[in-house]
Image (tube, rainbow, N blue to C red):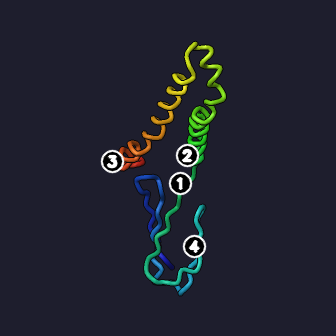
């Protein structure tokens, strides 16, 4: 029979190391979230089981809402340009300048955030 060791990594993923040297050429391993069939090599197989939870979907939903709101402000500003310029009693050029600064800040922050994330990492 094959022996197995289970360990928990830093980011919440569970890894299982299975010794397959005592088994035949084909090994069938089934876990809750991962299925590996027909493992043809002998030795050890490392299986990474993703964490069971909804945190990934929370991140997806939050990212969708943030992008929906930010892109909505940037791309629909022209619909409100004349009304905003009338209510503020200034020219459309000055009001459009505010949207241009918002758009420039939105797009220029991307490289800065990329450097920041590469420096400290994704999960800290």
Give the residue number, with chain letter if any, for mark 4. 36
State left or right for residue 60 relative to residue 9: right
Give the residue number, with chain letter if any, for mark 2. 55
- Estimate the x, y position of residue 112 in percent, counting from the top left: 38, 42
Task: Quadrant for residue 113, please give it.
Answer: top left
The tag earlier along the polypeptide, 4 or 3, is 4
Query: Which type of secondary structure does the marked residue at label 1 adopt?
Result: loop
Mark-to-mark CA distance, 1 and 4: 17 Å
Could you tell me if the residues under marks 2 and 3 are in contact, i.e. CB atoms within 8 Å?
A: no
Compared to residue 98, the image places residue 89 above or below, namely above
The tag earlier along the polypeptide, 1 or 4, is 4
Mark-to-mark CA distance, 4 and 3: 35 Å
The tag earlier along the polypeptide, 2 or 3, is 2
Q: Residues within 10 Å of mark 1 (few under 14, many from 20)?
A: few
The tag earlier along the polypeptide, 1 or 3, is 1
Q: Residues within 10 Å of mark 3 (few under 14, many from 20)?
A: few
Residue occupying image coordinates x 47% and y 40%: 107
Quarter occupied by the C terminus: top left
Q: Residues within 10 Å of mark 4 (few under 14, many from 20)?
A: few
- Estimate the x, y position of residue 3 in percent, counting from the top left: 46, 74
Mark-to-mark CA distance, 4 and 2: 25 Å
The tag earlier along the polypeptide, 4 or 2, is 4
Kindly report which numbered mark, 4 or 3, lies closer to the viewer in this rendering. 3
Give the residue number, with chain letter if any, for mark 1. 51
């Amino acid at each position: 029979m094959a022996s197995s060791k289970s360990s928990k990594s830093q980011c919440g993923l569970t890894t299982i190391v299975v010794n397959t040297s005592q088994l035949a050429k084909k090994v069938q391993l089934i876990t809750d979230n991962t299925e590996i069939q027909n493992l043809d090599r002998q030795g050890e197989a490392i299986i990474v089981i993703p964490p069971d939870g909804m945190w990934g979907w929370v991140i997806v939903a939050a990212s969708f809402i943030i992008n929906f709101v930010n892109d909505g402000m940037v791309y629909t500003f022209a619909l409100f340009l004349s009304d905003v310029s009338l209510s503020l009693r200034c020219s459309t050029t000055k009001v459009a300048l505010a949207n241009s600064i918002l758009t420039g800040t939105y797009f220029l922050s991307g490289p800065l955030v990329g450097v920041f994330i590469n420096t400290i990492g994704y999960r800290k």
